[in-house]
Image (cartoon, rainbow, N blue to C red):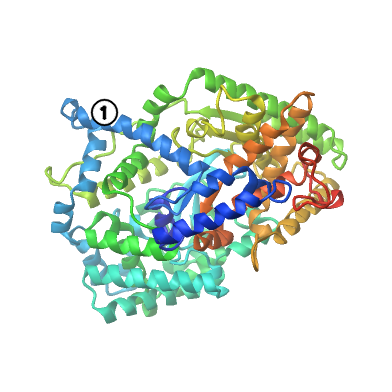
Amino acid sequence: MTRKILSIILASIYMFTPLMPVKAEEVRNQHVAVKKEVNTVRLQDDFYQAVNKEWLASAHIKPGYTESSAMTDLTDKSDANVRAIFDEILAKESTYKNNDTEKKMINLYKNELNWEARNKQGCEPIKKYLEQIDKVQTIEEFSKLLQDEEISLFDGLINMGIDQDIQDSTQNVLYIGSSSLQLEDADHYTMPSEMATKMKQALDEYNQKILELVGYSKDEAKQTIENVYKLESVMAPFIMGTKEINAHLDYYRATYNEYTIKELEALAPNLGLKKLLKANGVDKAKKIIVEEPKWLRALNSLYTQEHLELLKDYLKLNLIQDTSGCLTKEFEEAHHLLKAKLLGVNGKLTEEEVAFQTVNTVFSNALGKEYVERYFSPEAKADVEQMIDEIIAKYGERISKLEWMGDSTKKNAIQKLEAIKVKVGYPKKWEDYKKLEVKTFEEGSNLFENNLSVLKYLRDKQVNKLNKPVDRDKFSMPPQMVNAYYNPSNNEIVFPAGILQAPYYDINQSKEANLGGIGAVIGHEISHAFDNSGARFDKDGNLNNWWTYDDYKVFEKKEKAVREYYNHVEVSPGKYVDGNLTVGENIADIGGLACVIDILNDNEKADFKAFFNNWATIWRGIQSPEYAAYLLTVDAHSPYKVRVNEAIKQFEEFYKTYGITEKDGMYLAPEKRLGIW
């Protein structure tokens, strides 16, 4: 399954990232301005700014990053710990056998850093694939090419994946998704905007450069880019864009369209899907879900001899983009310039940092196993699990007391709540990398072949899941990652060890501080089970209505109020939060806080200041203006400052703790305050 170029960029920088080159002098000037502001701001007027004033005054964005935040600080700490583990592995290289996982890590790391060999090879590793595409003369030959085991790894026309059946969460089924787009979002093709124009300009320059590096003339590269956009512009109107997805009242059902192979052939006869599925080892799929049939029909109309050159150019550009990180220094420089223009990356990570991140991504489970043994105690795991039990119990009390929900729906909601699977720290089973082959340049391999080997390894893992029961013990994040998630199909909340560190969590921290950190995050993830998306899944993780008609209508009204409230939150002059895009995360923030505040209310001497202060602390962060503007269009989370200030405005406990009155900037009239869970 082809990765989209923007996804590659975001993943290659970091989880949390800013957007345009910023000179050091400009950064210093920005910090001076911030310091003046935060020294005078009152917490009654801007709680986030007041609590974080010292951190904001001294914070800076490191080279190669686009953001500095509590999460990037923790990620740096986690990376340093994992790096120490890997350095020990490097030091003991001579003790490992060829098929040892540690030896494969070392090989990959050294190949990343072997610029002499990479530059000497140039584009040779991918030329045979480009020549194969160039030789194609008919649409029938093109179809055969897409069935090639290696070429198919870079085909973004038809994205296939094995995943949990949302209507039968016990089984893995085949999903067919729409074509990858250069600009990622179909809205950027159908609804022109300033952001789309900037993105296209930056990507055009990048694509021009890498095509010329491969050997295209200036005019040939320009024509190739035009051909790809021409093809994508015809498909885009038939692919759901962000705005339609976020506004859709029943997105999951709209994208759940079951087809047999015979029906697929009838829907898109030109594509030869039966042979394509067989070549990918998924022709025995018991169930096939097509997410967007209109797109498949549109692609079928384009899949003709008349459009062959467009299709070939699309495939070649996807292949070059996906493999450019394995080639020469010139490709890396082009990629860096793209990140600078598009995402505001100032400076670079060191070559060693980039190589380590590659290893930490590919072998995350192996390094994660050692990480939890060294840095995550059984006592911390037990303590967090106990906290989760307490929060789930309190959540159940809150549901049982809801005035707007009937008894029947309450019963189902509590059953779902009590069925939530809790995962803390690390998985029960660790990944085995025996089937992954990584050899060095000296052994006759290269970084491109390493990449190809990883992609095949991942594809085989996917294909092997088809028609088999879902492994519900699996973690979708490695233990060292600083993050957390709720999975509606598993009805599970997951907290990797990486996030279970201060300021989010510390076993020696006060209960109030922990509740304002990881406690609120736990409540947040639980609330996702009951947000606009999670509320459509039942206790077993199936897409299934467990609501009465009247109760769901009230829920929709409350959900709409959250959308409309955040739509009117101004981030900067003329720039507003997208309430439709962020509704689920905003519901989760408010719902999570409501639950842990109830726990604090059980203690007459609870330190609410420690609680609210840590809530503001865990979301502190600085971003370049360009990156912040980008996130407003794509991030399901509200900006950090909004997450802090707008969520706590909804609770009377905040007003009592800090003496907030109608004269203060943090005041929100009671009748305007939100509440669902």
Residue 86, located in which quarter of the rendered image?
Answer: top left
Q: Which residue lies furthest to the top in this view?
A: 379
**The N terminus lies in quadrant:** bottom left
* Residue lying at 56% horizontally and 30% vertically, measured from the top left: 505
Query: Residue 547, image x and y in percent?
Result: 78, 43
Residue 169 visible, this orientation: yes
Residue 187, located in which quarter of the rendered image?
Answer: bottom right
198 sits left or right of 432 in the view? right
243 sits left or right of 481 in the view? right
State whether residue 329 is above or below residue 186: above
What kind of element bears circle 1?
helix
Residue 153, located in which quarter of the rendered image?
Answer: bottom left
Query: Residue 367, image x and y in percent?
Result: 35, 32
Q: How many labels does the image show?
A: 1
205 sits left or right of 286 in the view? left
State whether residue 583 is above or below residue 460: below
* Residue lying at 39% horizontally and 28% vertically, measured from the top left: 371
* Residue lying at 54% horizontally and 42% vertically, measured from the top left: 164
**The C terminus lies in quadrant:** top right
* Residue lying at 33% horizontally and 60% vertically, measured from the top left: 336
Residue 472 visible, this orientation: no
Report the residue marked by disc 1.
Answer: 88
Question: How many C-alpha atoms fall within 10 Å of the one at disc 1: few (<14), some, or many (≥20)?
Answer: few
Query: Residue 262, image x and y in percent?
Result: 50, 58
In the image, what residue type sits under mark 1? Answer: Glu
Query: Residue 267, image x and y in percent?
Result: 52, 65
The residue lying toward the viewer, choosing from 280 and 253, is 253
The residue lying toward the viewer, choosing from 668 and 533, is 668
